[in-house]
Image (tube, helix red, strand yellow):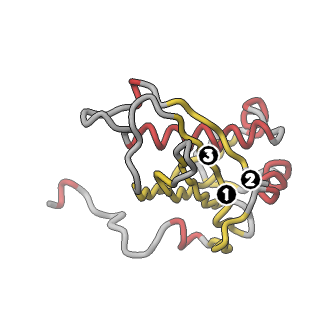
Amino acid sequence: MVFIQTFEVRWSDLDANRHVANTAYSNFMIATRMGFFRDSGFLQEDFERHRIGPAIISEEFHYLRETPPDGLLRVDVELAGLSADERFIQFHHSVYHPDGSLAVFARCTFCWIHLDTRKVREAPPGLAAILRKLERAQDFRELSKADAFPVGLPRRRRLDSL
């Protein structure tokens, strides 16, 4: 199933150049993901009951066409990757103008965290089943922890070492 939401570009979504700010695109994508979970029957109360929440690991944006003020955008979500234990997830988002042209393409990788222990955990069964129903990207693949946390990132770098 393809899940799509429509958003009106508001004045507060614009940056100093009077085009949609990157943070606004990110917020539209978050709202689309959470809308997918809600419309699939996994509500905010379910996240709370399972003491689970999504934690973004990385977001990568490709800006293809400018979005003018007062426009409408349609944002879709598809499953691009999932670990065998459903702890790590990657979504693709396409953001479309009303004429159907692609404005932005994004990849978002995240994990589920336990809200009390703050540790990565697997998706509860109901949520895992919902994830498996989402439309899969053409390049869908099974994710590993290394996909979520690539080798070579400067994780141990500290300001006081500079």
| Residue holding disc 1 | 78
Q: Amino acid at mark 2?
A: Val
Q: Residue at x 18, y 60 (%)?
A: 161
Instruction: Tell me, yes or no, whether the two marked residues, 1 and 2, touch with CB atoms within 8 Å.
Output: yes
Tell me the tag on residue 54: 3
Disc 3 secondary structure class = strand
Q: Amino acid at mark 1?
A: Glu
When asked about the image quadrant of residue 115, the answer is top right
| Residue holding disc 2 | 2
Q: Amino acid at mark 3?
A: Pro
What is the C-alpha distance between the residues marked 1 and 2? 7 Å
Residue 143 image offset from top left, x and y in percent: 63, 71
Residue 63 image offset from top left, x and y in percent: 40, 55
Left or right: residue 48 compared with residue 62: right
Q: Nearer the viewer, residue 61 or 68?
A: 68
Q: Nearer the viewer, mark 1 or mark 2?
A: 2
